[in-house]
């Protein structure tokens, strides 16, 4: 059994288990004791292995593999399930499905946690990851955008561009969808996409700032401070910087964070950064995770707009030429 599971992504079907000599009574006992975990009907994972997987990405990936093991026809993984195999950063919806696709006239239906899609795609859009066939990054991103809408599509398209997918490749991927449902929100997600977003939170923060309708958003704007260090602002509009802060910045690595210093030192460094940016003629706003969601989103928009207008009154909206030139040089150095 363990040899079979090792050859099948840590999974075994009930039929395989019986072929190994496992009785139904013994199989039931292994499930009751947690030695085996039913991933879907008739497919089991090693309990210890399953519990070691994170429930945001790795367990979803195993569910997709389990679904393919019991399909009678040939399918490829698509949408969220393809994204998990590509290790593409996405926002998992509250009620996620396994997504599989095969060629056919556009249609979709869900059964037992699996959403089946019939849709056109080119053979060039199919990639192999190990022994699995999945749709490529560009098609995966636009499928998510069409299926789930914002913010899921914007996050997926940003993540795809971050991985090197071009905007023209995303546009080509939705080219066959011109009369499919929800194609408009797919086009909007691709038009909005930027490769500079470091993670999904920065994408969602950019969407929040875009709702203010205060001008073009410039992501990852660098400024050399008087201390000599370079501050990379998440988002810039005019002379105002919008910065997203996640708890990960304040947690030590052993707690799943990235903070190399104690929390109070991290906070003080952020405060000094704001002061130095102010000396360069730039205002700042701070966004946290709860600002991105109702009911806090409306009050966050109001606060951010007020802070932006305060910067407008203090410094105006035209970025000094020296900061424009400096940002161009620092970006060229980073890209070198």
Image: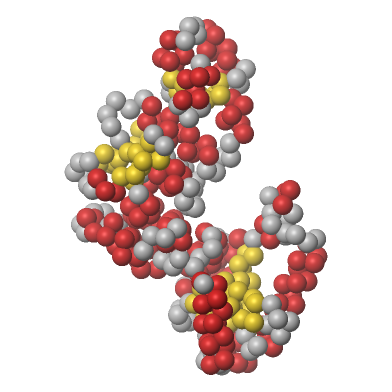
Q: Is residue 264 above or below residue 238?
A: above
Does residue 291 show up? yes
Instruction: Report the side of 224 relative to 263 (left or right).
Output: left
Residue at x-position 22% and y-position 55%: 176
Q: Is residue 90 above or below residue 201?
A: above
Colour scheme in the image?
Answer: secondary structure
Instruction: Report the side of 23 relative to 189 (left or right).
Output: right
Residue at x-position 26% and y-position 54%: 181
Q: State how many labels appear.
A: 0
Residue 307, x across and y down, in percent: 61, 81
Instruction: Find residue 111 and report its image quarter.
Output: top left
Residue 295, x across and y down, in percent: 56, 61
Residue at x-position 46% and y-position 44%: 84
Residue 256, x across and y down, in percent: 68, 50
Instruction: Report the side of 234 relative to 160 (left or right).
Output: right
Residue at x-position 51% and y-position 16%: 1
Residue 189, x across and y down, in percent: 38, 63
């Amino acid at each position: 059994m363990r040899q079979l599971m090792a050859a099948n992504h840590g999974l075994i079907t009930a039929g395989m288990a019986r072929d190994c000599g496992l009785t139904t009574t013994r199989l039931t006992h292994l499930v009751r004791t947690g030695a085996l975990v039913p991933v879907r009907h008739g497919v089991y994972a090693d309990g210890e292995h399953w519990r070691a997987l994170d429930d945001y990405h790795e367990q979803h990936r195993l569910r997709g593999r389990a679904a393919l093991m019991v399909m009678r026809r040939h399918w490829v993984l698509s949408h969220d399930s393809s994204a998990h195999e590509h290790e593409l950063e996405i926002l998992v919806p509250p009620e996620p499905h396994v997504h599989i696709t095969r060629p056919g006239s556009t249609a979709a239906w869900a059964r037992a946690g699996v959403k089946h899609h019939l849709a056109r795609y080119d053979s060039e859009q199919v990639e192999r990851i190990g022994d699995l066939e999945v749709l490529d990054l560009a098609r995966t991103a636009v499928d998510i955008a069409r299926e789930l809408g914002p913010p899921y599509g914007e996050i997926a398209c940003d993540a795809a561009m971050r991985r090197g997918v071009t905007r023209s490749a995303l546009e080509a991927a939705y080219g066959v969808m011109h009369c499919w449902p929800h194609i408009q929100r797919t086009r909007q997600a691709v038009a909005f996409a930027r490769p500079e977003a470091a993670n999904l939170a920065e994408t969602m923060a950019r969407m929040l700032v875009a709702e203010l309708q205060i001008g073009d958003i410039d992501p990852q704007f660098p400024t050399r401070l008087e201390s000599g260090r370079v501050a990379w602002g998440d988002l810039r509009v005019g002379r105002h910087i919008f910065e997203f802060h996640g708890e990960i910045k304040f947690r030590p690595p052993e707690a799943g964070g990235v903070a190399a210093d104690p929390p109070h030192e991290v906070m003080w460094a952020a405060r000094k950064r704001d002061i130095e940016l102010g000396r360069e003629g730039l205002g700042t706003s701070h966004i946290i995770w709860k600002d991105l969601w109702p009911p806090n989103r409306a009050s966050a928009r109001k606060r951010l707009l007020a802070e932006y207008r305060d910067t407008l009154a203090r410094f105006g909206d035209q970025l000094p030429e020296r900061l424009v030139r400096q940002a161009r040089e620092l970006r060229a150095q980073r890209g070198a």
